Amino acid sequence: MSVTALVENKTIFGPIRSRRFGNSLGIDLSPALKQCNFDCLYCELAPAATVDKQTNIVSVQTIIEDLKNALDEHNNIDVITLTANGEPTLYPYLSELIDEIAKIKGEREILILTNSAALIDEKVFQTLLKLDQVKLSLDAVTPEVFKKIDRPHKGIEIDILTCKVQEFSQEFAGKLYIEILFVYGLNDTKEEVQAINEVLKTLSHVERIDIGTIDRPPAYPVQGISYTELYEIAQMFDASLPIHIASRTHAESCVSSYTDEKIINTLDKRPLTLEDIELLFDEDSKSRLKKLIETGDITTNRIGNLEFLVLSKNLKRKR
């Protein structure tokens, strides 16, 4: 059995030193396949038809058992991050899962990375209020651009979505982050930036607004914008907004030991650069990574000036 096959359905990955959220241990709520209500052009996962619910579901018990084992192994975790091969808020037992994680998390905080769309579901809305940290994506606010860049499931309308984001920002007591990812020729126009700006000004209690661009191999043939262009866009936003230009250079070293299985599982969830490897892997882990490259399990993919280490099987799925 190959290493790749061994980790196909693993729910836990990392730890990963996040540039924005600290030392993160990830929970993949859809480890077997992509299940998402968006099919974003820039997604680092392979393209897939959108869905409005999960059909392949991991039990809460399985996730908690996996998490307990990971927390026993790693004691330097800042955040437990709920994410997915797709959209984590589609997980049908999210509320119960958060309650169970809260019992064992200790001083760590629970973070979710969501595309915001499920906020239109009142049960999901109330569930996310229980979290310590929430990162909401908001790539566009006009219907035309929203449909082009995020390719939402039928029935998801941006006007309703932005209203729910506004409402959530008023009620959420934890740390709220907004993320906007700019794609060349789509949401980087002055008109769209101004429209986003007007929505952002209506939000309450936002810790930080991260603006960035494509820095991982995308599912579709789209391009990012330069740092200079990001800086120029940052100047377009209202001065009162906590705009932050996401940058790889902000990462800090936090090396750990990775087995073959953990290397494969981590790269399956998040392609890494050699710079990332230097920040994350100890010397023995780097040796194991080199062997996996030699066997063909891992390969490289260049996007812009950055070269990423990715699973060979994932690269073949890209269009």
Image (tube, grey):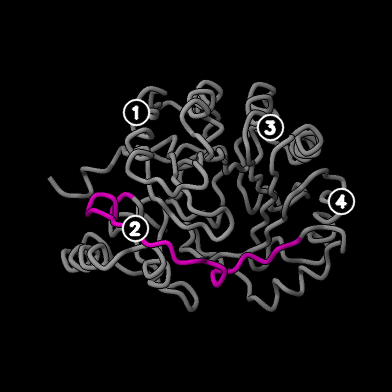
Compare marks 2 and 3 and give the one earlier in the sequence.
3
Residue tagged by mark 2? 256
Q: Tell whether position 249 is magenta.
A: yes
Q: Is residue 172 left or right of residue 86?
A: right
Q: Which circle's residue, 4 or 1, is located before the other in the chain?
A: 1
140 relative to 282, above or below: above
Decide which of 82, 149 is in the foreground and name it.
82
Q: Nearer the viewer, residue 139 or 106?
A: 106
- At numbered mark 1, what does the secondary structure look like: helix, strand or loop? helix
Hey, what amino acid is under mark 3?
A: Leu
- Mark nearer the N terminus (2 vs 4): 4
Query: Which residue position is annotated with label 4?
Result: 201
Residue 119's label in the rendered image is 3
**How far apart in space, not on screen, are marks 3 and 4 (Cα)?**
19 Å
Query: Circle 3 sits in a helix, a strand or a loop, which is it?
Result: helix
Residue at the image position 63 percent from the left and 41 percent from the top: 133
Q: Nearer the viewer, mark 3 or mark 1?
A: 1
Dot 4 falls on a residue whose secondary structure is: loop
Give the numbered dot on residue 65.
1
Verify CB contact (< 8 Å) between mark 2 and mark 3.
no
Note whether 18 is above or below 235 in the view shown: above
Which amino acid, by three-letter code, is at mark 4? Lys
Q: Is residue 216 left or right of residue 65?
A: right
**Residue 16: % across, % down:** 43, 54
Residue at point 46%, 74% (across, down)? 306
- Residue at 46 percent of width and 72 percent of height: 303
Cα–Cα span, label 3 and label 1: 28 Å
Q: Nearer the viewer, mark 2 or mark 4?
A: 2
Q: Horizontal and vertical percent for residue 10? A: 32, 39
Judge the density around disc 4: few (<14), some (14-19), many (≥20) Cα neighbours within 10 Å: few
